[in-house]
Amino acid sequence: MLQFILSGLAIGAIYGLIGMALPLTLYLQSGLGFSPLKAGLTLAPASLVSGLTAPFAGRLADRGGKYLLMSGMALYAAGLVILVSLAGPTSRWYDLLPGFAVAGLGVGCTMSPMQTNGKYARASWMSGS
């Protein structure tokens, strides 16, 4: 039962991590008046940092995955706090760069360990092969 509850929380966390892309894109386009290309390029550092961090976080997940997972969530939350504190009606794309970089680091430290922990937490007969 506990695994079922934790799995539900993990799925909720994944939707929360991915679900922030739409409100941020809408804010950049509607609130700040960015073009779609400029809004996408403003969000790109988060994806780049996440993509560079994820392979290393996946390897580290074998040693202490739950602590890496918790720190990744904390980094993602810190990145969003930085974004909220820096965002304003006159914000430029480079003003938001630190928040997106920290949020991307948090996503990279969250997704890979979550998948690694999920893979090793299930019984081998449930794997499908």
Image: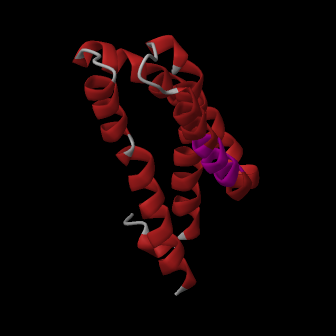
Q: Residue at x 43, y 73 (%)?
A: 126
Q: Which residues are magenta?
A: 68-77
Q: Nearer the viewer, residue 123 or 54?
A: 54
Answer with the quarter of the image where residue 35 lies. top left
Q: Residue at x 53, y 36 (%)?
A: 84
Residue 54 is situated, as x and y percent measured from the top left of the image, at 56, 35
- Is 72 in the magenta? yes
Residue 125 is situated, as x and y percent measured from the top left of the image, at 46, 74
In the image: residue 41, left or right of residue 122? left
Check the image and tell me how it is coloured: secondary structure
Q: Residue at x 46, y 25 (%)?
A: 88
Quadrant including the C terminus: bottom left
Answer with the quarter of the image where residue 44 lies. top left
Furthest toward the bottom, the residue is 1
Residue 60 is situated, as x and y percent measured from the top left of the image, at 70, 43
Q: Nearer the viewer, residue 17 or 68?
A: 17
Residue 67 is situated, as x and y percent measured from the top left of the image, at 73, 54
Residue 54 appears in the picture as rendered: no
- Is 57 in the magenta? no
Residue 9 appears in the picture as rendered: yes
Q: Residue at x 31, y 27 (%)?
A: 31
Dominant SS type (magenta): helix
In the image: residue 99, left or right of residue 13? right
Classify 101 as above or below 127. Answer: above
